[in-house]
Image (tube, grey):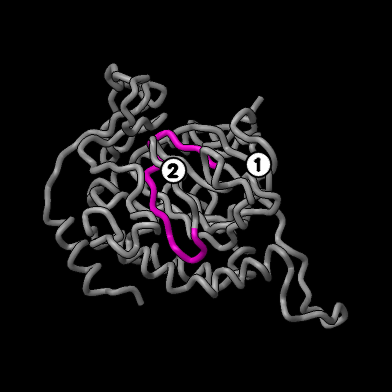
Amino acid sequence: MIQRSLLSTSLHRCCRQQRHQQLIVSSKFSSSASDEPPEDSATIIQGPSLLTMTGVHRPSPSLFQLPGLRSLPFWTAPESSAQNRKHRVAFKDPLVTTAVEYVESNYESIRSEYFASVLGQGRETDLDSGKVLKPLEPDYDVSTKGGEHADDALHSGNWDWHSYVLNGRKNEKFKERCPKTAEVIDTLEKEGLLFGTPFGFCFFSTLHGNSSIQAHSGPMNLRLRMHLPLVVPPKKDNAQSSSRPTTGIRVADQVREWHEGKAVILDDSYVHEVWNDANSPRVLLLLDLWHPDVQMEEKQKISTMFSYAKEKGWIGQAKKQ
């Protein structure tokens, strides 16, 4: 069980606070007078003009913006500062800290399930026993309309997803093959930490060698994204002379490397890019958390709004034409 007393106190404080904000979204989600959204959904308004394309890095979500949320490119300190840092998580935020510590405490189990379910490196070797299962197949299709990465130009090389949560929907086959990983995610969900909308994800992210994901920004600032590195390739011999690490991520103007078993929290509403210049894969468990500043009432109304938009076909799994 996650530290329940800490979570209960934090969630109770969020419920006491009353902050009335509007969700700024693209006008593509505007409704006609004869087709009004549910009364308990978030207010939808046309977004104002924004100053962009400057040398200053700020959140720039492509679809939704909730005003007033704290923002930083990374919410976890770099591992290189481990000896000198006072706090690992930004603002000493108790909800983010709890999520990080809980997921990291299950690192060994999660990593073992990845090797068994995705790579097929289980302990059973007798093919006639019926216990040797076929490895899970990648399940993300970049030709999906409305997908966050449904732009072929973003990808170079190979990037595989093995998802437990894909666009807010759970994959029961993943749960059967990776029960401990699923249990960890389900616990976060029960505690109100997992980002449970059609824009929520949790998957094993395998970025193969000599592959990259070009600079882009996420669709909203309502979530924080966690990376739990499971496999990090060794550095190349010439990495010291290179302008960037062999395998890494840039968010805004900050560059980080991954360290196995050490979670990284980032705000993907900033422009970010990922690369793996090594010859072997980089693997991590990626999962989305609610931004800790989004309050309970807001979560409920935002979720209702997303459900309405999904029913209308504005977001979903339709193929690109």
In the rendering, at what x and y percent does residue 28 appear?
41, 22
Residue 174, magenta (yes or no):
no
Q: Check disc 2 and report the residue beneath it.
A: 255
Residue 270, magenta (yes or no):
yes
Is label 2 or label 1 in front? 2
Q: Check disc 1 and report the residue beneath it.
A: 211
Q: Is residue 77 visible?
A: yes
Viewport quadrant of the C terminus:
top right
Question: Residue at 42% of width from left, 47% of height from top?
Answer: 197
In this rendered view, identify the residue nearer to me: 217 or 135: 217
Looking at the rendered structure, the kind of residue marked 2 is: Val
Question: Residue at 61% of width from left, 70% of height from top?
Answer: 113
Decide whether the magenta segment is chiefly helix, strand or loop. loop
Question: Residue at 58% of width from left, 38% of height from top?
Answer: 213
In the rendering, at what x and y percent does residue 266 appear?
39, 48
In the rendering, at what x and y percent does residue 23 appear?
27, 34
In the rendered image of this protein, does residue 101 appear above or below residue 295?
below
In the rendered structure, which segment of residues is drawn in magenta?
259-274
Q: Residues within 10 Å of mark 1 (few under 14, many from 20)?
A: many
In the rendered image of this protein, does residue 170 appear above or below residue 50?
below
Confirm or deny contact between disc 2 and disc 1 (CB under 8 A): no
Q: CA distance from mark 2 to mark 1?
A: 17 Å
